[in-house]
Image: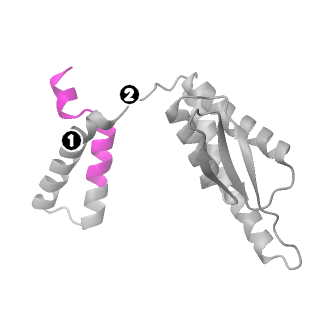
Amino acid sequence: MKPLGRLLPTPTLSLVLLVIWLLLVRSLAPGQLLLGLLLAVGIPLLTRRLWEPLPSVHRPWTLCRFVARVLWDILKANLEVSYLILKPGRAPRPGFVEYPLLVREPLTITLLANTITLTPGTVSTNIRLDRSSLLIHVLDLDDEKALVDAIRTRYEQPLKEIFEC
């Protein structure tokens, strides 16, 4: 490992930690910069043994489209949930759906579960120990099969392509 790689095992994380520290303290004083640099270097060094190696992104443009799609879906779902709550006379039909997973890698499953949870109206509640399925709570469940198909095509398939699972 290169000397810089030993000092900064995750340079992006170090930069993010430094920026977050400076935003939190709202100061560019030399002491705060020094403390921020110590935290930005120290935290990744102390926690690097806990991190699994990150898979490489094989399709960056697919990743960009995936992020844009998720942001759009979050906006759209916020409007749909707001309408559902504010609309008089129609009660939501909550339910649980067991979503069968095609991916088995922990990072990909975590990204999928987080994506589902970020979208208003759905929450990933559990994963089977054998990583075969996610249990999802849905605020307004119309068609279970349509929901499973939408998650598979909109989220899981792109994640499989991005990380070549």
Does any portion of residue 25 appear in the rendered image? Answer: yes
Quarter holding the C terminus? top right
Main SS category, magenta section:
helix
Q: Amino acid at mark 2?
A: Pro
Q: In the image, residue 145 lies at what x, y percent?
A: 84, 42
Judged from the image, the secondary structure of the residue bearing numbered disc 1 is: helix
Instruction: Please tell me whether mark 2 sits on a helix, a strand or a loop.
Output: loop
Relative image position of residue 98 (x, y in whole percent): 72, 44
Determine whether 88 is above or below 156 in the image.
Answer: below
Q: Name the outermost residue toward the left.
A: 31
Residue type, mark 1 in image? Leu
Towards the viewer: 94 or 34? 94
Q: Which residue is mark 2?
A: 53
In this rendering, is residue 83 above or below 108?
below
Left or right, 136 with respect to 6, comes to right
- The residue at the point 26 percent across, 51 percent down is 18
Taking the spot 15% from the left edge, 60% from the top edge, the residue there is 32
Q: Which contiguous range is marked in magenta?
A: 1-19
Can you identify the residue that label 1 sits on? 46
Which badge, 1 or 2, comes first in the chain's sequence? Answer: 1
Q: Please tell me whether residue 113 belongs to the stretch shown in magenta.
A: no
Q: Is residue 103 left or right of residue 36?
A: right
Taking the spot 62% from the left edge, 25% from the top edge, the residue there is 161
User: In this image, 20 relative to 30: left or right?
Assistant: right
Q: Residue furthest bottom?
A: 88
Residue 73 percent coordinates (x, y): 69, 51
Any part of residue 10 in sight: no
- Quadrant in which residue 10 is drawn: top left
The disc placed on residue 97 is: none
**For mark 2, does the 10 Å Cα neighbourhood hold few (<14), some (14 to 19), or many (20 or more) residues?**
few
